[in-house]
Image: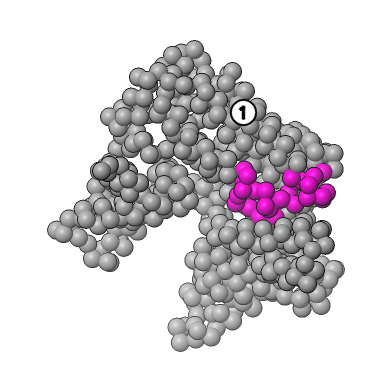
């Protein structure tokens, strides 16, 4: 009977990874996200990076607060429990630490890692991500329900049900400022519920009775940006109070002063300022696509993959959320999603060009379904980035798709997404625009097709030099997948 079962394969992958990250005693924490195995490590110098990248199932590594090993969707969820079991089995009793010792060592490791890699801008982007990323599941769920409700309304079906669906879809967005305030206070080291309480002022209907800067405030004015600013202010006021208020009065005075002072500043300052900024973001995005849509789409679609590689795409999350608050959808996400289409076209071309390299072809076959659905990391780390030049041609495909969608925006047909997170084919249920749903879907699908085709053609004809093909398009090239031979990018 064959022992080559999925369970054995996943355990073998975990067993191959463990010694290359320094063994069980070097692992302080294990977690995973959609595509990455995230490890806390006691001693980073024990990691064998090149050998780890050469493990067949490993598509790349990313160093951040944790050491992140890209395995791809589905695979990572199955490998992680096997890895955790091996770590538990391999711990040395004589090296076991108490909970306090382990916590202290973990804190020291994280502090050293942050000091090594963090810059103020990267720390800022990481905090932005920590505030908004936890909200994405609710944005997706409510966005899909909103799309379904819109379809039913347009068709005139189930009129007794559509008001309920509208309420379900809109409830979260009506109170999103509260959740942003809660997460912001948590991220900046304050009491989360106080951050949420201050942010709740922004969406409270009673603010419509207040005049500030010569105008009557509107519930929701300032949106998520105002909530973010209000919660940050609340954190600093709270910390000031903790420092100066006597302990005997802390439970009464600190929360009162925190909510009162930050609330007054929010009402008579932040709501107006954040409202003006939010309006400028919406106006600017619409102007950009109305007047320079094709060029703007080309730039956004072409440079999004490098932004993702550098982690700079996180800066766009508040902008997306602000646009969704204002207009019901973000016009930027469908354009940025074209980068994934270019990546898919690129991978298809690599698959055909490297007919004799079974290792790369197998990687593409396993990663392509995820790429089509908008999860691009497996193809990025496993195919285009290690090869070098195909990464650039993938960006060309994204630029072409982005220009296509941007061109239609110039012509008056806007394509937007009611939530952030998905891309590729997974974005179809979230599409919304200023025209009919059929038109919106057709434009987005056309952009994907353009991205696929241009990414494919650019890679097929310009993605490889003769030297690259000679080195890669052979069975011998599969030695690059052997753990003893590190995988390195081929020079273009």
In the rendered image of this protein, does residue 277 appear above or below residue 335?
Answer: below
Which residue lies most toward the left here? 94
**Residue lying farthest to the front in this orientation:** 1
- Quarter of the picture containing the N terminus is top left
Q: Residue at x 65, y 48 (%)?
A: 427
Q: Nearer the viewer, residue 408 or 250?
A: 408
Left-right relation of 111 to 347: left
Please name the residue shown 35% across and 58% down the image: 107
Residue closer to the observer: 315 or 305: 305
Q: Secondary structure at mark 1?
A: helix
Whether 223 is drawn above or below 124: the answer is: below
Along the line of sight, the residue nearer the viewer: 244 or 418: 418
Which corner quadrant of the image does residue 471 belong to? top left
Q: Residues within 10 Å of mark 1 (few under 14, many from 20)?
A: many
Q: Is residue 460 magenta?
A: no
Q: Quadrant of residue 167?
A: bottom right
Which residues make up the magenta segment? 413-441
Does residue 330 appear in this view? Answer: no
- 308 left or right, relative to 220: left
Q: Examine the rendered structure and indicate whether residue 357 appears above or below residue 220.
A: above
Q: Quick check: 492 above or below 94?
A: above
Residue 425: horizontal and vertical position, in percent?
Answer: 63, 44
> Pointer 1: what residue?
455
């Amino acid at each position: 009977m064959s022992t080559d079962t999925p369970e054995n394969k996943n355990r073998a992958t975990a067993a191959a990874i463990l010694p290359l990250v320094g063994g069980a005693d070097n692992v302080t924490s294990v977690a995973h996200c959609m595509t990455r195995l995230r490890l806390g490590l006691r001693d980073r110098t024990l990691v064998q990076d090149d050998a780890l990248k050469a493990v067949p199932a490993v598509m790349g590594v990313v160093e951040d607060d944790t050491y992140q090993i890209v395995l791809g969707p589905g695979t990572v969820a199955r490998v992680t429990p096997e890895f955790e079991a091996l770590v538990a089995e391999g711990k040395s009793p004589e090296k076991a630490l108490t909970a306090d010792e382990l916590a202290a060592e973990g804190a020291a490791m994280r502090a050293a890692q942050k000091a090594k890699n963090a810059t103020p801008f990267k720390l800022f982007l990481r905090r932005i991500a920590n505030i908004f990323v936890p909200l994405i599941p609710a944005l997706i769920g409510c966005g899909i329900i909103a799309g379904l409700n819109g379809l039913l309304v347009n068709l005139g079906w189930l009129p007794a049900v559509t008001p309920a669906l509208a309420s379900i879809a809109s409830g979260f967005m009506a109170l999103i400022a509260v959740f942003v305030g809660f997460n912001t206070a948590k991220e900046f080291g304050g009491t989360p519920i106080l951050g949420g309480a201050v942010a709740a002022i922004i969406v409270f209907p009673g603010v419509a009775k207040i005049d500030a800067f010569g105008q009557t405030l509107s519930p929701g004015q300032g949106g998520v940006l105002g909530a973010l600013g209000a919660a940050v202010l609340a954190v600093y006021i709270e910390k000031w109070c903790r420092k100066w208020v006597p302990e005997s009065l802390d439970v009464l005075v600190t929360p009162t002063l925190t909510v009162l002072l930050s609330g007054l500043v929010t009402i008579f300052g932040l709501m107006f300022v954040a409202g003006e900024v939010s309006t400028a973001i919406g106006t600017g995005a619409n102007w950009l696509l109305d007047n320079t849509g094709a060029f703007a789409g080309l730039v956004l679609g072409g440079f999004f993959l490098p932004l993702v590689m550098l982690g700079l795409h996180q800066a766009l999350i508040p902008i997306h959320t602000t646009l969704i608050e204002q207009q019901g959808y973000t016009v930027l996400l469908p354009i940025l999603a074209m980068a994934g289409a270019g990546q898919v076209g690129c991978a298809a071309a690599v698959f055909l060009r490297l007919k004799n390299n079974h290792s790369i072809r197998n990687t593409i076959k396993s990663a392509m379904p995820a790429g089509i659905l908008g999860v691009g990391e497996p193809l990025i780390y496993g195919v285009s980035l290690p090869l070098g030049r195909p990464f650039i041609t993938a960006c060309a495909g994204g630029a072409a798709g982005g220009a296509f969608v941007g061109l239609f925006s110039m012509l008056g047909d806007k394509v937007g997404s009611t939530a952030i997170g998905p891309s590729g084919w997974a974005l179809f249920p979230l599409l919304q625009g200023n025209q009919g749903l059929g038109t919106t879907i057709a434009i987005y699908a056309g952009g994907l097709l353009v991205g696929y085709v241009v990414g494919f053609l650019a890679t097929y004809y310009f993605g490889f030099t003769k030297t690259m093909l000679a080195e890669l398009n052979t069975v011998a090239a599969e030695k690059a997948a052997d753990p003893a031979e590190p995988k390195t990018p081929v020079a273009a």
